[in-house]
Amino acid sequence: MQSTTGGGPFRQDDLIVRPAASWTPGVHALLAALHRDGFDAAPHPAGYDEVWERVTYLPGDTGDLDGHAAMRGEKALRSAASLLRRYHDCSALFAKSLAASHAWQLPARSPCEVICHGDFAPYNVVLNDGEVSGIIDFEAAHPGPRMWDLAYAVYRWAPLSSGVAIKGMDTLAAQVGRTRIFIDAYGLSVNERSSLPDVIVERLEALLAFMEREAARGIERYRRNLQEGHDRIYREDIAYIRKCSTEIVAGLTG
């Protein structure tokens, strides 16, 4: 998610520069803590002031599922899930201390198990040789449960959506198959799998509420999202996941 102060990120030599926001100190504290604890797949924080923030550039390919064949590959899918698990395990070491000392763009969720990335989607990772090697854009980071972050990641990577027009991902069976690959690589326990569709629905409902609240505050990005019908897509996907919940759970636990 971009800052509400306007404009998007841009590259300046080996740095990524974007407008600073109220949550910038928390994001930079998170990035610094990750590197202190040995997690090397995130940008280094490179300072911020009242106007701009800077982080290091991560080399690699970026893109979404529909425009990047390698991002659709099973190697990318498995490595993305494994990297998310590694990120969660690392952020769990300091999640509670960061949660208590910083503001975040998205509301904190209970229990505070990790610092959720908040938008772990194909467009927010970098790819090298078909493997997901880094995570970018931590602007939506916030404290919460692992499942909260994992649910949104599955929604984006499967993707669990009724409007998918990508060959090989446009059926429920294919989406459930990709979901199973992702959660297997993440290491989600069998006991937790049956709750995944409900958590995805709850996560999307929370996203809708956030978008509508920010649009009502006059934040242009979210006003534009609503004008473009993003809320309609999320509502359709919520209905789709609810309708197919039994089949999804069967495919993940059977």
Image (spheres, rainbow, N blue to C red):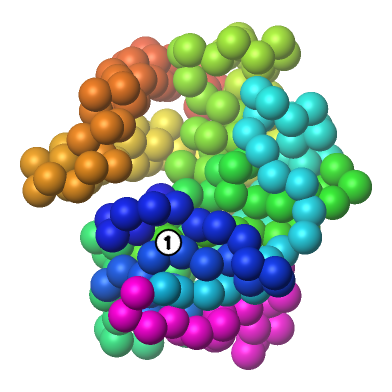
Residue in front for this viewpoint, 133 or 115: 133
Q: What residue did someone put label 1 on? A: 139
Picture quadrant where residue 157 is located? top right
Residue in front for this viewpoint, 71 or 51: 51
| Whether residue 98 can be seen here | no
Residue at image position (50%, 34%) is 155
Residue 133 place in picture, x, y as percent: 77, 58
Is residue 243 shown left or right of residue 89?
left
Q: Is residue 180 above or below residue 84?
A: above
Residue in front for this viewpoint, 224 or 197: 224
Residue at image position (50%, 84%) is 47
Q: Is residue 39 above or below residue 64?
A: below
* Magenta-drawn segment: 29-51
Q: Which quarter of the rendering shows the C terminus?
A: top right
Residue 177 is covered by the magenta coloring: no
Is residue 250 shown left or right of residue 201?
right
Farthest right residue?
129
Residue 42 is covered by the magenta coloring: yes
Is residue 139 shown left or right of residue 235?
right
Pointer 1: residues within 10 angstroms few (<14), some, or many (20+)? many
Q: Give the amino acid type for the residue marked by disc 1 in the picture.
A: Glu
Q: Is residue 75 above or below residue 232?
A: below
Residue in front for this viewpoint, 216 or 163: 216
Q: Is residue 112 above or below residue 240?
A: below
